Amino acid sequence: MSDPVSELFDEFRHDHQTMGRGLFAIAKALRAEDDQAAGSAARAIDRAAGAHIKFEELYFYPELRALLGNQTVDRFAQEHSEGLAAMVRLTALEESARLSDAERKHLLDQIETMRAHTDECGEHFGALGRIPRQQQESLLAALRKLRSEAQLWTQLATGKPSE
């Protein structure tokens, strides 16, 4: 018999590991001034992270507000916005396009903000354990539903995520 609570923890942890590796690849490429590799890594994480980011914004962050407070969750949302802005730019990078040094630095700053967020958020997902079991089951169902829709992270740039 499966345990939805354990499954939610496992899926959440897996998502953060995937995002962490992808963000690291983007940062490494930007530092090496390999803009095309940064764009390629961004396109990969765009596909991998879309459902998870939308899940956090629609379902998880409202739960966290009661546990961690508005200021912390507002900061998480701002960090998502910075990561999203970098993703939008990098996924749209045309073949053979070159970023200016200033733009590359700005994108690297945004990616580093999102990397720190992913690391910190990974620590805070322990707050999941403080959410009642029935709600955790609902959260798992919501995450799986969003995954089945296969939304890109950059699709969230059109405004607030909606169900």
Image (cartoon, rainbow, N blue to C red):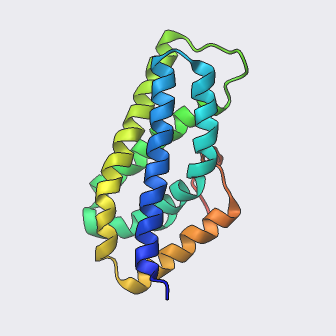
**Position in image of residue 50 (x %, y %):** 59, 52
**What residue is drawn where x is 59% and y is 35%?**
42
Q: How many numbered circles does the render carry?
A: 0
Residue reaching furthest to the front: 1
Is 48 above or below relative to 63?
Answer: above
Given residues 17 and 89, the one toward you in this image is 17
Residue reaching furthest to the top: 101
When asked about the image quadrant of residue 44, the answer is top right
**What residue is drawn where x is 35% and y is 55%?**
122
**Position in image of residue 147 (x %, y %):** 63, 63
Given residues 137 and 72, the one toward you in this image is 137
**Position in image of residue 161 (x %, y %):** 58, 57
Any part of residue 102 in sight: yes
Please give left or right for residue 163 compared with residue 80 in the image: right
Any part of residue 163 in sight: no
Please give left or right for residue 9 compared with residue 89 in the image: left
When asked about the image quadrant of residue 96, the answer is top right
Please give left or right for residue 129 compared with residue 42 in the image: left
Is 68 above or below relative to 107?
Answer: below
**What residue is drawn where x is 51% and y is 40%?**
22
Is 127 above or below relative to 32?
Answer: below
Given residues 129 and 84, the one toward you in this image is 129
